[in-house]
Image (cartoon, rainbow, N blue to C red):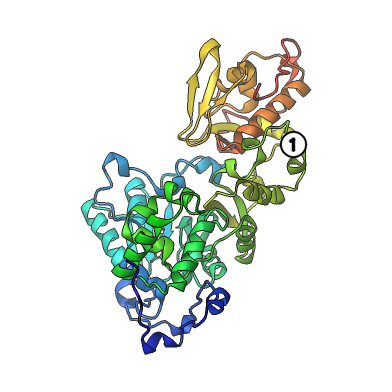
């Protein structure tokens, strides 16, 4: 049953009287910072204290802690970090110019109930700081800290906007699912940037506008119904969801989201009071507004045409000709269903040569291919390989592609893989073939690349000249990827 609401005098000033008022009402409520009531926890936590009363975001997460609290981080299904942003598994994407580091200073900004403890559990040699405005969420993090004896975990009650301290900087900052709940996301990201080490990386996950269209339609609906965040309001949400038609915009999201099968997740999704969705262009602007540099997408698959459109499609060439940033925006519009944008940023003055992956110059032949941690390289009949990375479709490889990828061992560069595979082709043929193959593998989200300087000099000499002399004879590679 949907509850009928009686408006109290205290809410009357916010009351909308006519349908047209609802439609005109701003969906996002910005709460002036000076309206927050601050309690003094400073001495105890070393952090600025926070609101729990006037700030609707803080009071939501105080009552509905997010995500669902995990009881034991050591059980098999919990031995992971959320959203695949793990800096050990993705070190080739974050820091392609250097070997992975075990000991880091990690900040989990807006850690919620589990995430800071997960990092501390997975990175025993690192020092992990978790910060959140929800004391209830931090209480569960503390429970996990005690349960797993995580002496490397430090928890702070506070706003991430206040994180900058003169005396500390972090190698890696995770802020997933948080900045879109801030009154001023750019101010929040700027604050995190000021706490970032010179070659540090910030992982950001933001809600995507188009893929969550159905969510925002229902948020608007529930706001019209003046639902708040109580048990009755939640019951109304559940009842409403169960009556929606099978072709409502929300249905795909409901099938795919992990957040719609528990109460705090439903509140977070449908009854949030401050939820600003982002397009690709918004993500890029946010990064610039925060004075940082955009480094890359977590899953290239969604941002390049290779994965979605056959090269023979008449419009492929139009998309492929776009400048890279527009191509990302175009792909977002073509997909229509990406519900989160996950990306990583760094200091604007970090040298792009230390992290930029490009296939324009022939130097890409020195890149060392590193498969994504969850890529399965499977044998198929006739010595061929198939690349499988769920949820993407399997990618069957041709013979020359298979021969080359069999040589990938995490240390060999592309040029050496080609050589080891026994090809003896003219340089231009090999270059063309490899450029197409390895760019595709990167854009499909299957491989990252390490730069030559990430490997000890004795293994891959930095300044070695390309030596194609040995590749003059032999069978040409002139088979296009995908054939
Ligand atoms: C959707 S949850 C995400 C939790 C966690 N990052 C994860 O991915 O599991 C958002 C969290 O950010 C916290 N939060 C919201 N605004 C914040 C702020 N200004 N400073 C610090 N934490 C904040 C909330 O209390 C909540 O725990």
Q: Quadrant of the C terminus?
A: top right
Please provide percent x and percent y for residue 207: 51, 58
Nearer to us in this view, 167 or 100: 100
Horizontal side of 394 relative to 1 (left or right) equals: right
| 23 and 402: which is toward the camera | 23
Residue at screen point 66% across, 25% down: 481
Q: Quadrant of ligand 1?
A: bottom left
Q: Quadrant of the N terminus?
A: bottom left
For the question of whether residue 97 can be seen, the reply is no
Tell me residue 346's x, y (percent).
58, 55
**Residue 244 visible, this angle:** yes
- The residue closer to the viewer here, 287 or 14, is 14
Q: Quadrant of residue 347?
A: bottom right
Q: Residue at x 26, y 43 (%)?
A: 74
Residue 5 location, quadrant: bottom left
User: Would residue 120 be found to the left or right of residue 85 on screen?
Assistant: left
Which class describes the residues within 10 Å of circle 1: few (<14), some (14-19), or many (20+)?
few
What residue do we see at 27% from left, 60% from top? 140
In the rendered image, which residue does mark 1 sit on? 361
Residue 243 on image: x %, y %: 40, 56
Q: Eyeballing the image, is 408 above or below 81?
A: above
């Amino acid at each position: 049953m949907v509850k009928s609401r009686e408006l109290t005098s205290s809410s009357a000033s916010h009351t909308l009287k006519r349908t047209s008022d609802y439609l005109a009402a701003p969906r996002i409520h910005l709460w002036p910072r000076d309206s927050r009531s601050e309690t003094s926890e400073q001495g105890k936590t070393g952090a600025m204290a926070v609101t729990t009363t006037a700030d609707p975001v803080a009071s939501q997460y105080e009552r509905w802690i997010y995500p669902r609290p995990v009881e034991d981080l050591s059980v098999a299904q919990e031995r992971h970090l959320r959203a695949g942003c793990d800096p050990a598994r993705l070190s080739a994407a974050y820091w392609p110019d250097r070997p992975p580091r075990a000991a880091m200073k990690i900040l989990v900004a807006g850690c919620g109930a589990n995430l800071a403890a997960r990092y501390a559990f997975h990175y025993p040699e690192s020092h992990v700081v978790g910060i959140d405005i929800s004391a209830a969420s931090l209480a569960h993090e503390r429970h996990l800290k005690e349960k797993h004896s995580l002496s490397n975990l430090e928890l702070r009650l506070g706003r991430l906007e206040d994180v900058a301290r003169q005396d500390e900087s972090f190698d890696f900052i995770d802020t997933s699912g948080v900045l879109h709940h801030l009154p001023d996301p750019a101010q929040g990201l700027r604050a995190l940037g000021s706490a970032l080490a010179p070659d540090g990386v910030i992982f950001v996950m933001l809600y995507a506008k188009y893929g969550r269209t159905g969510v925002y339609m229902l948020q608007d609906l529930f706001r019209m119904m003046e639902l708040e965040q109580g048990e009755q309001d939640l019951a109304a949400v559940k009842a409403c969801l169960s009556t929606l038609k099978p072709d409502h915009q929300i249905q795909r999201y409901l099938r795919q989201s992990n957040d719609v099968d528990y109460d705090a997740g439903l509140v977070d999704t449908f009854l949030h009071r401050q939820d600003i969705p982002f397009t690709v262009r918004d993500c890029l602007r946010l990064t610039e507004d925060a004075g940082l540099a955009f480094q890359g997408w977590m899953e290239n698959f969604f941002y390049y045409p290779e994965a979605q459109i056959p090269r023979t499609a008449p419009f492929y060439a139009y998309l492929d000709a776009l400048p890279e940033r527009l191509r990302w925006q175009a792909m977002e519009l073509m997909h229509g269903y990406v519900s989160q944008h996950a990306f990583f940023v760094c200091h604007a003055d970090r040298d792009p040569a230390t992290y930029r992956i490009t296939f324009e110059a022939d130097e890409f032949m020195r890149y060392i291919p590193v498969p994504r941690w969850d890529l399965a390289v499977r044998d198929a009949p006739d010595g061929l390989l198939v690349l499988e990375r769920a949820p993407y479709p399997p990618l069957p490889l041709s013979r020359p592609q298979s021969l080359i990828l069999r040589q990938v061992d995490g240390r060999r560069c592309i040029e050496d893989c080609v050589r080891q595979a026994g090809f003896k082709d003219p340089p231009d043929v090999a270059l063309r073939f490899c450029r197409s193959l390895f760019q595709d593998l990167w854009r499909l989200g299957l491989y990252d690349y390490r730069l030559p300087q990430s490997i000890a000099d004795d293994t891959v000499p930095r300044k070695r000249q390309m030596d194609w002399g040995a590749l003059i004879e032999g069978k040409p590679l002139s088979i296009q990827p995908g054939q």
